[in-house]
Amino acid sequence: MKLPRILTLIALAVACSVQAQSKGDDLIVEMSQAFRQGNRARLAQLLPQVRGHVLEPWAAYWELKSRLDTALPQEVQDFFTRYAGTYQEDRLRNDWLLLLGQRRDWTNFEAEYPKYRMNDDREVRCYALLVTAVRDGPAAPASLGEEVRRNWFAQRDVDDGCTLAASRLIGNADVPGRMVTNDAWQKARLALEANRPRAAAAAVEIVPPEAMGQFNELNQSPTKYLTSRVVVASKARKEIMVLALIKLAATDPDNAARQLDNKWGPQLTPEERDWVWGVIARQAAQRLGNEALDHYAKVSRDRDLTDDMLAWKVRAALRVIRGPQWPAVLQAIDAMSEEAQREPAWVYWKARALLARSAPSERQKEEAQKLLESIASWRGFYPQLALEELGQKVAVPPPPAPITPEEKEAARRNPSLNRALYAIALGIRGEGVREWNYATNLEKPGGMAERELLAAAQFACEREVWDRCINTSDRTKTEFDIEQRFPMPFRESVVRRSQEIGLDPAYVYGLIRQESRFVMDARSHVGASGLMQVMPATARWTARKIGLPNFVADQLHDRETNIAIGTGYLKLVLDGFDGSMPLAAAAYNAGPRRPRSWRNGPLIEAAMWAENVPFGETRDYVKKVLANTTLYAAILTGQPQSLKARLGLVGPRDARLPEPIQDLP
């Protein structure tokens, strides 16, 4: 055979192979869509056609999961055998355990649970704890009741597993560390505060049955319920009254305060009164009301409050017009749980409160020093502030030892990592991210060590899957690769555009890292698109302002256009807030109108202002963007940087000055 003929055949073989792989990819994508649509017939039809594809485990999972409620146990076991050791095996086992729990098939549940490696589903864990309680009785671990309580309280929505476990353990004297009726009432309080009435109702159903009718009545109209009652005689009736006051406080805290002051307070126990005052005070603090601390002052024992109520007491004490009320800050933090007190925010503010005393003792100075030293580093908002309190600036940490060829090769050969990247490349990002996280999870038995995490992160970086690169490297505790954690993709475009319009490139990078993790096709649940997560309406407004003609929303998917629109908008809001980076970051996340109202208060440190942002997402966003910015500035300049200098002060704008931009969207 002549050489040209051989080359032609080789080329045809390669083309056929590529075409076959492309067809397989298309079928995988179609199966993912069929799974989301609940199309069982199409999944069964397509599965045989993707056998041998790298994402076959996902295809098989979708097909079996879609009919798991009718599948034979042997089919499930065959799946476990065929895909042993994969994420999909453990994912299906999680689903199967939930189904066995719902069916009350405790024999098969108990046989399957020891093989479950994921172990991050609270409902599955509650089923397992219930099985242990029933099986072991008095010999069960003393911590069992507390673990059920912790998982149940952490569940935002009503679930079968933890609710069932709680209902079986409350009042069960045969189980060590048994739960009590007060646990059900506390769960109902927490759920109603979070506006989860179904979860609250499920908790109330565990206590005396007559309480359920009253709960439904108060849930429909707490004002009417409170008005129609005169006295409370029983424990259940008191708790229902507490729930009514909590429900009322969510929409009308002033009315709830009057009801508690005048009518119901004397009829409740000190703990019940404290809880309701804590709810009312927190509502006032979240609304940035000046009366919040007055409400908190009516609490007789701070230990009766939840960590969230106490957190808002700290925030309210930092925002007082006449200056921070440091004794109240210290009192609230000291009343928090040990776990909450270890959070960097409260470590930092406790240290500040100790040092702010008129004449702190040497012991208090030493305690504050130790607190600051315990969190001080470049790793986050409060660690950076703590570093500066100790007289240091934020610098780039030294790099770890280079990743060895052997470490790189181990990451490249990891089947789960490859499957994850393949899925992401096909646009099946959710599945890819979940499998990647599972493969790199340090908490899971067999999870990756730090050097393995760095190698996995580098594997993602090299393929420009920046979110997995950053998030994976972010999880190391002792070795820090700043190039992985704070990459600078598209550097020429970002730096050039930022400098052209007078923006700090570090600020732009700090914002992009938080917005999209540099994922080009990122799209939020509200419709924001691209690197800088710009909303279509905002993009059209910005395009007019910066003179970008003939703009259409689809152009946001173009990298250069997205950067131009995003930086243009950021510059406009930054100028609109007199150059305040914290206010501009809040405006970028929540829209400019809200920060305009949030700044109306005392002139305070921006760190105090940021901690008082009412929206949890925006509060977290502002702190992370500014911390990111400080680190990026250190990287770009090669010089230590100050977070405090970027924060400055925040307060009402000077009414004598004209509004720079009045039509910000």
Image: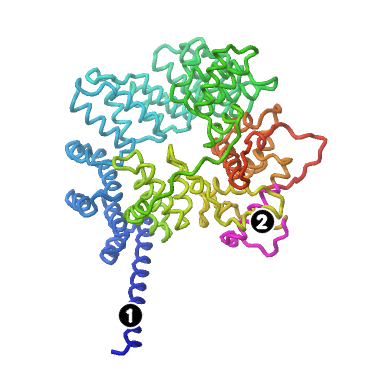
Which portion, as a residue range, is magenta?
Answer: 546-572
Vertical side of 121 occupied by 541: above or below: below
Residue 529 in view: no
Left or right: 549 with respect to 332?
right
Q: To which residue does mark 2 refer?
A: 497
Above or below residue 162? Residue 431 is below
Determine if the magenta segment contains residue 549.
Answer: yes
Q: Decide: few, some or many residues near mark 1? Use Cα within 10 Å; few <14, some 14-19, many ≥20.
A: few
Q: Quadrant of residue 648?
A: top right
Q: Position of residue 443 (x, y in %)?
A: 34, 38
- Please name whichever residue, 659 or 219, is drawn nearer the observer in this view of the structure: 659
The reply, left or right, for residue 428 in relation to residue 567 is left
Q: Residues within 10 Å of mark 2 (few under 14, many from 20)?
A: some
Residue 636 x, y percent position in the rendering: 61, 48
Report x, y in % for residue 498.
Answer: 67, 52
Residue extending furthest toward the bottom = 2
Which is more N-terminal, label 2 or label 1? 1
Q: Return the x and y of residue 378 as percentages of the image width and height.
A: 54, 36
Residue annotated with mark 1 = 10
